[in-house]
Amino acid sequence: MKNRISNVMVGAPGLYTYGAMRIGGIIRDAGFHPHITRDISQLHGDQVFMSLYSTLHLLDPAIKEVVKRIQQKGGECIIGGPVSSGPEMVLGELHPDLVVCGEGEEAVRCILHRADRVDCPNCAYIEDGRIIKTEQKRNQDLSFPLPLIPDDIGAQDIRGAQTYIETHRGCFGRCGFCQVPRVFGRRIRSRELDEILKEVRAFQKKGVRRLALIGGTGSLYRSKDGEVNSDAFISLLEGISSIMGPRNVSCPDIRADCLTDEVLEAVRAYTIGWIFFGIESGSEKMLGLMQKGIPVDTVRDAVEQCRQHGVKPAGSFITGYPGEEEEDFQATKDLMEELSLDDVFISLAEPIPSTPLADLVCEQDPASDLVSIPHQGEYSGLHLTEAEARAFDLMLHADICRPVPRMTQDVRYQAYLHDVRKQGSDIRKVTRLLRTYYCRQ
Ligand code: SF4
């Protein structure tokens, strides 16, 4: 063991992420006394593990400053989390000592105990000006110590929940914009139910009143070869709900082709009763380009099935994907109108490194990038780009397509405008980073 290590900290900007708490638990289990914070200005110590969940964190001057300060005081800064899909970008922008790529548990155990990182899996670092990447591994056994849960977790609010918990890893899907199958693989690895319930009790004891399930797509818990295991999913929701109460559990993300009547009954009985489908587009051509693997008719059936079981269907849509033409966009609007969803989430396509979408963005002519070219149609007076204008139009359209249509008042209109401009600006920054570090490889 490296004897000099006495002070270890874990943090994530603004949130106690599940990943940071998980890594904190691994460090505590290894015999250290880590502190966890969501105020990154508090981070200091011999070894500091920072979990970053947005590519924009790589451009954040406050985060750059924290990394520099830790190193100037003789500490070592290790960065992991979703940004690790692009280790070149992390190393190039933030200059940490080490990046933990993908699943971090084994890597962190190793880093704590070895001076030579070449022996630690899932690491990336710079040596003699070159980026060294060690062997990439995934945990076969998802048994972990309890997360390091901070005393003030009850004050956290992530869309109404205080925390997310993990039930399984992986997704058999291939969606081109998603990093889940690339990071966790396409085979589902599930946690033991008793360990999940023990964790739920621990979170509740620390003040968590409401929690949500992560894991790509909820009903794949204990599934095999894409076949939903309804019994396992029911036991999972029933167990969590018996601790938290059904109105305090949500299982938002379920693939439209991973539903059974039993799954829907469990969602109705043991959760807040909503499902968010990743619908993405109403155009079969775009669904093909996105490698979504879920035809529009399957979405129609899933929405209908939800309503029959008293579950509220919601959906997310992506616009601005390379190749989206006016008629594809119109097909999305038409589908939105037909489905009349209870809630809708609109986003611009974000190219995350290691995904097929990132490769498409690298290959496309910047002059045809919908996120950058000026919009010249109905909203030209608002000075939006084409993707921003489409997202804005979808947001307005969603309001009138609800089961009970709502007027878009000025405040909401302005909020939508602000949202699409911010998304556009963020994605242009991410794309610039991608072109600097990723497209050249
Ligand atoms: S279904 Fe969801 S988790 Fe699976 S690849 Fe598609 S977007 Fe990712």
Image: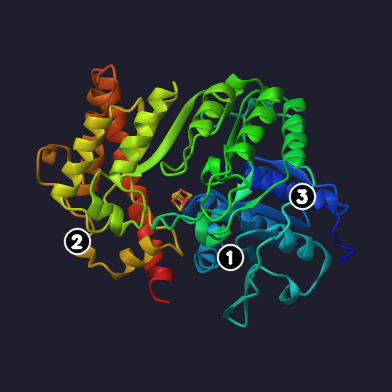
Return the residue nearer the eye: 427 or 193: 193
Q: Is residue 222 above or below residue 336?
A: below
Q: Is residue 214 above or below residue 64?
A: above
Residue placed furthest toward the bottom: 128
Q: CA distance from mark 1 to mark 3?
A: 30 Å
Q: Residue at x 14, y 38 (%)?
A: 379
Chain-order first, disc 1 or disc 3: 1
**Dot 1 beta carbon under 8 Å from ligand 1:** no
333 horizontally vs 38: left or right: left
Which of the labelled discs sits on residue 368, or is there none? 2
Residue 71 visible at all: yes
Q: Of circles 1 and 3, which is in front?
A: 3
Q: Are marks 3 and 2 in contact (CB under 8 Å)?
A: no
Q: Which residue is mark 1?
A: 95
Q: Are marks 1 and 3 in contact (CB under 8 Å)?
A: no
Position in image of residue 386 (x %, y %): 19, 48
Secondary structure of the residue carrying numbered label 2:
helix
- Report the quarter where the C terminus lies: bottom left
Position in image of residue 34 (x %, y %): 80, 47
Return the residue nearer the eye: 332 or 115: 332
Q: Residue at x 29, y 42 (%)?
A: 297
Secondary structure of the residue carrying numbered label 1:
loop
Q: Which residue is mark 3?
A: 144
Q: Amino acid at mark 2?
A: Ser
Q: CA distance from mark 3 to mark 2?
A: 46 Å
